[in-house]
Image (tube, grey):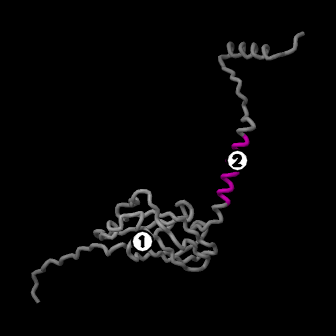
């Protein structure tokens, strides 16, 4: 008797496909070794990112801060930060400048960067971070008074604006333009 070979296997597959209408392709049902290694590497990256993020300052893990901003002029803003946590806070050199009523981000001019200094605040201490917007934004436009009950605010982050790792901070570049209400004459004489 002849030994079983690839031709025999192919003949059996052809007959099976003809009788059942099911197409049998030559793909292996399990991923190859290469695919298994890629999946393992992706899994390791995901787990290490999660482990790294767990050690970052985050309001979701109970870390707390107090933050306020003062416009110094010429595009420079001083941000006072009180770190009330046991973890050191490292702000990234990234921000979003937003307008309250429009809920829109004010886009920077061209590709110039905002300059940051003093972005690390030790645990249980206070510090002043300085943000220079002069090279990135139209300062004359920002210093134009906003109408009514409107204001600008920053969104600052220590981890790419991930939920729980971003903070809002209002900033006034100019006093708002509030039109005084006129009180109609009631017709009563005093």
Query: Would you call the spot at circle 2 few (<14 residues within 10 Å), some (14-19), or many (20 or more)?
Result: few
Which residue is painted at 70% across and 47% down in the image? 41
Q: Is residue 150 magenta?
A: no
Outermost residue to the top: 1
Q: Is residue 48 left or right of residue 75?
A: right
Vertical arrangement, residue 57 with respect to residue 10, above or below: below
Residue nearest the viewer, comparing 116 with 173: 116
C-alpha span from label 1 to label 2: 42 Å
When the figure is inspected, residue 109 is found, relative to residue 38, above or below; the finding is: below
The residue where tag 1 is placed is 170
For disc 2, the marked residue is 41
The first of marks 1 and 2 along the sequence is: 2
Image quadrant assignment for residue 35 = top right
Q: Residue at x 60, y 79 (%)?
A: 124
SS at badge 2: helix
Residue 110 position within the rendered picture, expressed as x and y whole percent measured from the top left: 41, 57
Residue in view at x 40 percent, y 75 percent: 71
Q: Compared with residue 28, is residue 112 higher up or lower down, i.e. above or below?
A: below
Whole-percent x, y for residue 132 in the image:
45, 70
| Displayed quadrant of residue 10 | top right
Residue sitting farthest toward the bottom: 190
Question: Among all residues in the image, which is located at the extreme right?
Answer: 1
- Element under disc 1: strand
Crowd around label 1: few <14 · some 14–19 · many ≥20 (10 Å): some
How would you classify the magenta stretch by its main secondary structure? helix
Q: Quadrant of the C terminus?
A: bottom left
Image spot of residue 39 (x, y percent): 69, 43
Task: Point out the stretch of residues depicted in magenta.
Answer: 36-51
Residue plotted at (43% across, 73% down)? 77
């Amino acid at each position: 008797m002849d030994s079983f070979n690839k031709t025999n296997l192919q003949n059996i597959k052809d007959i099976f496909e003809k009788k059942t209408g099911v197409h049998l392709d030559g793909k292996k049902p399990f991923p190859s070794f290469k695919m298994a290694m890629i999946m393992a590497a992706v899994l390791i990256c995901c787990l290490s990112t999660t482990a790294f993020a767990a050690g970052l300052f985050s309001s979701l893990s109970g870390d707390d801060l107090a933050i306020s901003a003062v416009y110094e002029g010429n595009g420079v803003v001083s941000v006072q930060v009180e770190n009330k946590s046991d973890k050191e806070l490292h702000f990234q050199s990234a921000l979003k400048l937003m307008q309250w009523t429009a809920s829109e981000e004010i886009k920077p001019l061209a590709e110039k960067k905002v300059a940051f200094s003093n972005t690390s605040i030790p645990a249980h201490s206070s510090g002043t971070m300085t943000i220079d917007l002069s090279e990135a934004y139209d300062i004359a436009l920002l210093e134009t008074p906003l109408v009514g009950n409107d204001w600008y605010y920053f969104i600052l982050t220590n981890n790419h604006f991930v939920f729980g790792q971003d903070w809002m901070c209002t900033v006034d570049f100019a006093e708002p333009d509030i039109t005084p209400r006129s009180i109609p004459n009631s017709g009563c004489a005093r």
